[in-house]
Image (spheres, rainbow, N blue to C red):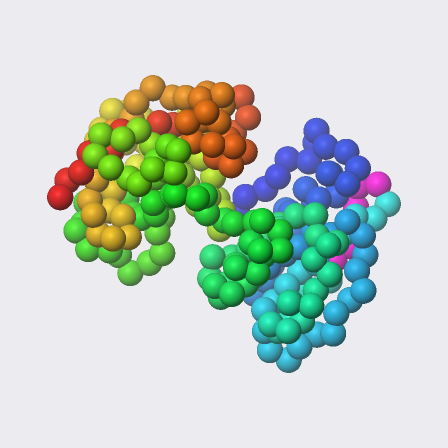
Amino acid sequence: MLFMDVRALNGADRAYARYWNHVHSVERALAGVKLALWLRAAPNIPRESSEGIVVELGWPVATDQFQHVRMTLDAAALQAFAWGLVDAVALARFELPNWVHDLIERKLGYSAKLPGQVSGWWTDEAETPGWRPNGALLPPGGEPLADGQDCLVLVDLDDWWGVLSVLGLGSYTFGSRLESGETVAFLDESRRRWAVRRLDDVDLAEVRTRWGAQAAERTRPGVGAVRVRVSSIN
């Protein structure tokens, strides 16, 4: 599980960080929480459904504290929710139904994925594994993935895709191999295989220029982003 450092934050930001840590905890995962929304103020609590999506709502109180409520909401309740109160999506599990992801993107502009990302697996195999993608590549400027292209590497950060930084390389087996100069195989969801090797890292300004503002927002502040070059294997 990931945790947000609250030490340099104040007020509502600190309260949100505490709430974010709360919903990303093992306890929330075991409770089946799939969607967590951070609100500007206490809501009128919607009527709970007998079946639906397990949702956790949180909002700031006092100086840096929060209150929260967990409930089950069906499609009608989620459609009718007071979305204007929502400041942030703290958690949206990949396994949520597509209509839920479509709803929060339409209402809030939130998407776990970046436009144009190519998801897949860091594997030498030619067939897709039986589990969800564990990696992704981001071509520049919305271009399709192509031979000889420079890409950013994306990693799954608790059901949200972020740009891999230099500091994060050693946290992943494929990252350690890239760091040591190896060429690593990547299999995308269309079963196309790619050879990936690391190039010089890029700073925030270059990420924003070549890969766009959304990618820049998902980089680690003050740290270079990992850039790779891809070559088609088949």
Residue 77 shows up from this direction = yes
Residue name at image x 20 percent, y 44 percent: 193
Give the main secondary structure, helix, strand or loop, of the magenta stretch: strand
Task: Report x, y in % for residue 204.
Answer: 49, 23
Quick check: 40 left or right of 219?
A: right
Residue 172 shows up from this direction = no
Q: Which residues are magenta?
A: 63-68
Task: Report x, y in % for residue 231.
Answer: 20, 34
Magenta-span inclusion, residue 228: no
Q: Is 105 in front, or is 184? A: 105
Q: Quadrant of residue 178?
A: top left
**Count of numbered circles in the view:** 0
Quick check: 18 left or right of 184?
A: right
Task: Report x, y in % for residue 157.
Answer: 48, 44
Q: Is 153 in front, or is 105? A: 105
Residue name at image x 27 percent, y 48 percent: 188
Q: Is 120 in front, or is 117? A: 117
Q: Is residue 81 above or below residue 207?
A: below
Residue at the right extreme? 62
Task: Report x, y in % for residue 56.
Answer: 66, 60
Residue name at image x 58 percent, y 69 percent: 53
Quick check: 69 left or right of 134?
A: right
Q: Is residue 161 above or below residue 231?
A: below
Residue name at image x 70 percent, y 57 percent: 83
Residue at the bottom extreme? 50
Q: Is residue 2 above or below residue 5?
A: below
Quick check: 226 left or right of 128?
A: right
Figure quadrant of the C terminus: top left
